[in-house]
Amino acid sequence: MISDAKIPYGKHSISQTDIDAVVEVLETQYLTQGTQVPAFEKAICDYVGAKHCVAVNSGTSGLHVACLALGIGQGDIVWTSPNSFAASANCALYCGASVDFVDIDPLSRNMCPIKLEEKLHSAQQLNALPKAIVVVHFAGASCDMQTIHALCAPLNIAVIEDAAHALGATYHNKPVGNCEFSDMAVFSFHPVKSITTAEGGAIVTNKQALADACALFAKHGITRELDKMQGEPHGPWYYQQLVLGYNYRLSDVHAALGISQLKRLDDFIAKRRAAADYYVKKLRDLPVQLPLSTSPDSSAWHLFMIELKAHDRPQIFKQLHEHNIAVNVHYIPIHCHPYYQSLGFKANDFPNALSFYENAITLPLFADFQQEEQDKVVSVLKDLLK
Ligand SMILES: *Cc1c(COP(=O)(O)O)cnc(C)c1O
């Protein structure tokens, strides 16, 4: 019998080993600033193939310090994708910069490189080029990084990857986060993401100066390194605040969970991929737009979104919930939120993101998704969409 418990759209997976790792730290002397955060940072570098990692207390703080590290401030412009969580744009506003968006490609649902090229061209005429762009690997599938890099590098525009969905994904057969085509990539370890630390995030980069700046801004702007200080230290206790920073540190308790979870990442991704493949196979004949297969690039399958073509989305959404299938919708385009409308954006400014939003439903997908749960989702959907 299929249990009638609610099937969530996403969920973390915590093992006894994960729990033991956290408890072990609780019994040591250091709950923060011990050995676990540096060990987690090294494990992330090893996994994604980046030179430096700065762990922080959320993906949002990671995006904020990434912008600060690039020197983004008042008078600067940052572009991102409207099809994302608000944090992808808020990070620039935190720094006093202004934000604009580049519409998505309807099939990849990621920032459209052709629209980016066109917008760069017009911005160049107006002398209003962005200082950085934040690209978002929506649902775990990498953006076309090589093309984006080729467009931005000659214009001296920095590229930040919002890789909150994409830990465990690959691009050109290499891990997302190796920063081959970007300045920095930012991960989130919120419970619905590939791995979790409860709250947490990380910035990865191959550039020493950016890593140092991220660490400085994430730790109050304070340094204890002699060679970074001005003047002579007053004594061995001495430290200096050099810039206005924040307390965005990750704790050792959270990092211990992250280390343990990272060891399970490949297994999580394999299970997400198998479930995504199963959806594609089973839903192929329904009147819906399925996610693009990204082969040879491999998605981390953070989300599995279908777009309805011939049905009323609110109605189908409600009916799925009535069957205890807790589908969701990602995303209300950032520029459609009242706050962004108050900055002057209109819903129709980015029609592809708007149209995707109006028809999309996020189906359940997570590492511990059971076969009978997925079969239930498939059969209910088939019933509703026939
Ligand atoms: C989750 C998420 C974030 C923010 O991460 P937090 O760790 O929740 O702060 C940023 N961008 C995207 C695209 C996300 O999905």
Image: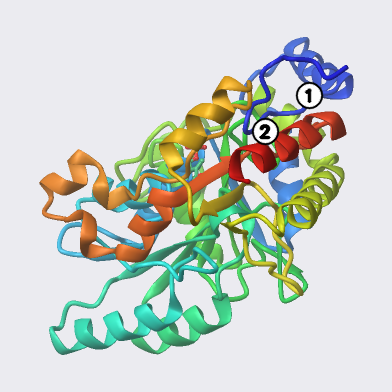
Who comes first in sequence, dot 2 or dot 1? Answer: 1
- Label 1, ligand 1: CB separation under 8 Å: no
Element marked by disc 1: loop
- Out of 242 and 365, give the one closest to the viewer: 365
Q: Mark 1 highlights which residue? A: 14
Left or right for 95, reference 39: left
**Which picture quadrant has residue 87?**
top left
Residue 267 appears anywhere in the view = yes
- Out of 370 and 29, give the one closest to the viewer: 370
Q: Is residue 326 above or below residue 297?
A: above
Q: Is residue 71 above or below residue 230?
A: below
Which residue is at a point 55% across and 60% down the rendered structure image?
A: 137
Q: Give the colouring mode of the picture.
A: rainbow
Q: How far apart are marks 2 and 1 (CA)?
A: 9 Å
Q: Mark 2 highlights which residue? A: 196
The reply to whether callout 2 and callout 1 are in contact (CB within 8 Å) is yes
Q: What residue type is labelled 2?
A: Thr
Q: How crowded is mark 1: few (under 14 residues within 10 Å), some or many (20 or more)?
A: some
